[in-house]
Amino acid sequence: MRDVKHRAGMVRGFSLVEVVFALGLCSFVLVALLGLVLAGLRQDRDSREALAAMTAANRIIESYRAVASTKNALPNFPLPSDLATRSANDASSPLYVDDQGVKTGVAAAAAFGVLYRVLPSSASTPPSSSQVYLYVYWPAAASVAMARGHYEVVTTISLAATSAN
């Protein structure tokens, strides 16, 4: 006996419930993939910005070390030459630097804002040296509290050569 549902010329297809379920599953997968791609792009942007901030901070530190060892002033240098006599700048007066660590006059032309603090000398720091804390944030036009990202570094810098100027 032949099955009644399989008569000659009749092809069995998917039911409406199966089609709707498959479309819903495909839609969910596509939305999830789109979310992952957008999250990956955001993470890539954040990583590039953090790397640029780290590079700018390292250039500031290395430039200051070069200035301190030669007792010469560099034009457009972000940290003040009399850093040994200053203790910090505050959030109301950040320094503005471009992506190369060079000082710019206004936040609109800058990539990063820089806050610094000279930490008190301790037994672990060499004589005539001090620890300097740099806080680099971006975008420069944003306030410190509203910054999209930041990079912090503490390093030991010789302050004796610049304080003699």
Image: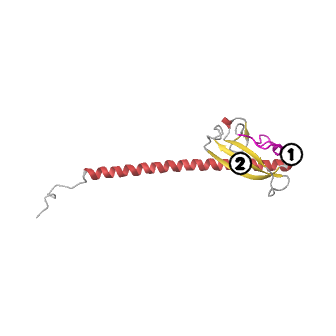
Q: Nearer the viewer, residue 135 or 72?
A: 135
What is the distance, in whole Å, between disc 1 and disc 2 at their CAs? 22 Å
Stretch in magenta:
72-90
- Label 1 CA crowd tier, 10 Å (few <14, some 14–19, many 20+): some
The residue positioned 21% from the left and 56% from the top of the image is: 12
* Lateral position of residue 146 relative to residue 129, left or right: left
* Rendered view: 2 above or below 13: below
Q: Nearer the viewer, residue 146 or 102?
A: 146
The residue positioned 64% from the left and 50% from the top of the image is: 51
Marked residue nearer the N-terminal end (1 or 2): 2
Residue 140 sits in quarter: top right
View extreme (bottom): residue: 1
The reply to whether the C-beta atoms of the residues labelled 1 and 2 are less than 8 Å apart is no
The residue positioned 84% from the left and 50% from the top of the image is: 69
Number of on-image labels: 2
Q: Secondary structure at mark 1?
A: helix
x then y, percent, for residue 66:
81, 49
Q: Secondary structure at mark 2?
A: helix
Tell me, for residue 57, which label it has, or none. Answer: 2
Query: Which quadrant: the C terminus?
Result: top right
Q: Nearer the viewer, residue 130 or 11?
A: 130
Q: Which residue is mark 1?
A: 163
- Label 2 CA crowd tier, 10 Å (few <14, some 14–19, many 20+): many
* Lateral position of residue 12 relative to residue 98, left or right: left
Main secondary structure found in the magenta portion: loop
* Lateral position of residue 128 relative to residue 114, left or right: right
Tell me, for residue 50, which label it has, or none. Answer: none
Q: Amino acid at mark 1?
A: Ser
Q: Amino acid at mark 2?
A: Ala
* Rendered view: 1 above or below 21: below
x then y, percent, for residue 164:
89, 45
